[in-house]
Amino acid sequence: MAESRTTRRIDDLGELKAFAHPLRLKLYRALVVARTATASQLADQVDEAVSLVSYHLRKLAALGLIEEAEPQSGDGRERWWQVAYQQLNVTTSAHDAPETAAARLALTRVAFRQQREMHDAYLDVQSTWEPQWQEAAIGSEYLTEMTAAELRELSQEMHALIQKWQTRGRAALEAGDTEGREHVALHLYGFPFRT
């Protein structure tokens, strides 16, 4: 993955609609976690047929969201994939046309539904994790008053903090420091509401 390709904003209506497919979003997330994988490996993770997974991987590649990776084995028949960007941005824009806003909302709802499913799956097995992981896991809600500018500033600070920890984790993995490391999901939402 090229160093300059860190973030991509998805604004195109067709791309938003295509990425909102639940299996494509699940495959993309699995590929982020795996870093590189074949259709067969991903099919095992999402419990779908390899042919269906291959089809959706090709669609993600056509969108430019994933790309072929260097082969990780000597089997030349296997096609390896990786994400093309470290981050995707699909946040709402006040300038979206109504169709684009609807497609962005559909994608956001699918993503949030899958995030909720991930958290529910964790809760189902939480007691089976080692005590240090049970105590380290977080779940918080903060209700406060802010301006839109303050919320944007908080968001930028939180993203910078998370990126620091992502960089630290990647560097540790690349150095072979895998002991005690697990995948961790952080889901953040910040939005205005009225009572």
Image (cartoon, rainbow, N blue to C red):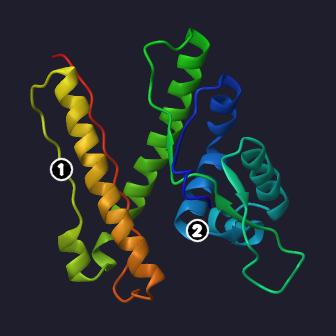
User: Which of the 4 image quarters holds residue 178?
Assistant: bottom left
**Badge 2: few (under 14), some or many (20 or more) residues near its Cα, within 10 Å?**
few
User: In the displayed structure, would residue 73 be above or below residue 94?
Assistant: below
Q: Identify the element where label 2 is drawn.
A: loop
Question: Which residue sits at x=31%, y=70%?
Answer: 126
Residue 182 makes an appearance in the image? no
User: Which of the 4 image quarters holds residue 22?
Assistant: top right
User: Which of the 4 image quarters holds residue 71?
Assistant: bottom right
Question: Which residue sits at x=26%, y=55%?
Answer: 161
Residue type pointed to by label 2: Arg
Question: Which sits earlier in the primary sequence, circle 2 or circle 1?
Answer: 2
Q: Position of residue 176 (x, y in %)?
A: 45, 88
Q: Position of residue 172 (x, y in %)?
A: 38, 80
Question: Which residue sits at x=39%, y=87%?
Answer: 177
User: In the displayed structure, would residue 66 be above or below residue 82?
Assistant: above
Q: CA distance from mark 2 to mark 1?
A: 29 Å
In the picture of the structure, the residue carrying the numbered disc 2 is 35
Q: Identify the element where label 1 is drawn.
A: loop
Does 73 sit left or right of 157 as displayed? Answer: right
User: In the displayed structure, would residue 138 be above or below residue 23?
Assistant: below
User: In the displayed structure, would residue 163 be above or below residue 170?
Assistant: above
Question: Which of 143 and 95 lies nearest the eye of the viewer?
Answer: 95
Does 17 sit left or right of 80 as displayed? Answer: left
Answer yes or no: do the residues labelled 2 and 1 have beta carbons within 8 Å?
A: no
For this orientation, the residue located farthest to the front is 4
Question: Which residue sits at x=45%, y=52%?
Answer: 117
In the picture of the structure, the residue carrying the numbered disc 1 is 140
Residue type pointed to by label 1: Ser
Q: Position of residue 51 (x, y in %)?
A: 85, 59
Residue 112 makes an appearance in the image? yes
Give the numbered dot on residue 46: none
